[in-house]
Amino acid sequence: MAEIEQILIVRSYAEATILESHLQEAEIPYLLQAFNDPAFGSFWRRKDGWGLLLAPAEYRVRIEEICADLRGEGDSR
C-alpha cells in the first residue's frame, strides 16, 4: 500500500473544488480534509487555509504542478 502524506494546504473551498476536479481528471488518488470542527460550526476558522490535501507520496510532484498552475504560480513559458 502506498504511503499517504500531506501534500499541501488548500486555501479555500473553491480551490478545493477546482483542485478535486483536476485530480479526478488526472486519475490521482487523494483525500481532502477540511479544517472544521463540528463543535464550533462555522464560528471557528483557521487562518492558514481551508484544509489539507493528502495523497500517496508518489503523486506529490504532479499534484504540486497542478496546484501551482491553478494558483497562477506555474511556469509561464
Image (spheres, rainbow, N blue to C red):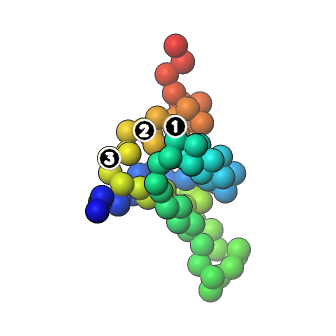
From the viewer's perspective, tell me whether residue 13 is left or right of residue 28. Answer: right
Q: In this view, does 45 lie above or below 38?
A: above
Identify the element where label 1 is drawn.
helix
Q: Which residue is drawn at 30% across and 58% down?
A: 2
Q: Which residue is drawn at 59% across and 59% down?
A: 50
In the image, what residue type sits under mark 2?
Arg
Q: Do the residues labelled 2 and 1 touch (CB within 8 Å)?
A: yes
Between the C-alphas of marks 1 and 3, the distance is 14 Å
Residue 47 visible at all:
no
- Name the residue beneath numbered marker 1: 66
Q: How crowded is mark 3: few (under 14 residues within 10 Å), some or many (20 or more)?
A: few
Task: Please tell me how crowded label 1 is: few (under 14), some (14-19), or many (20+) other residues with Cα within 10 Å.
Answer: some
Q: In this view, does 3 lie above or below 63?
A: below
Disc 3 marks which residue? 58
Task: Say which mark, if any, is on residue 62.
Answer: 2
Marks 2 and 1, how far apart in space? 6 Å
Is 29 placed above or below 72 here? Answer: below
SS of the residue under disc 2:
helix
Numbered disc 3: secondary structure: helix
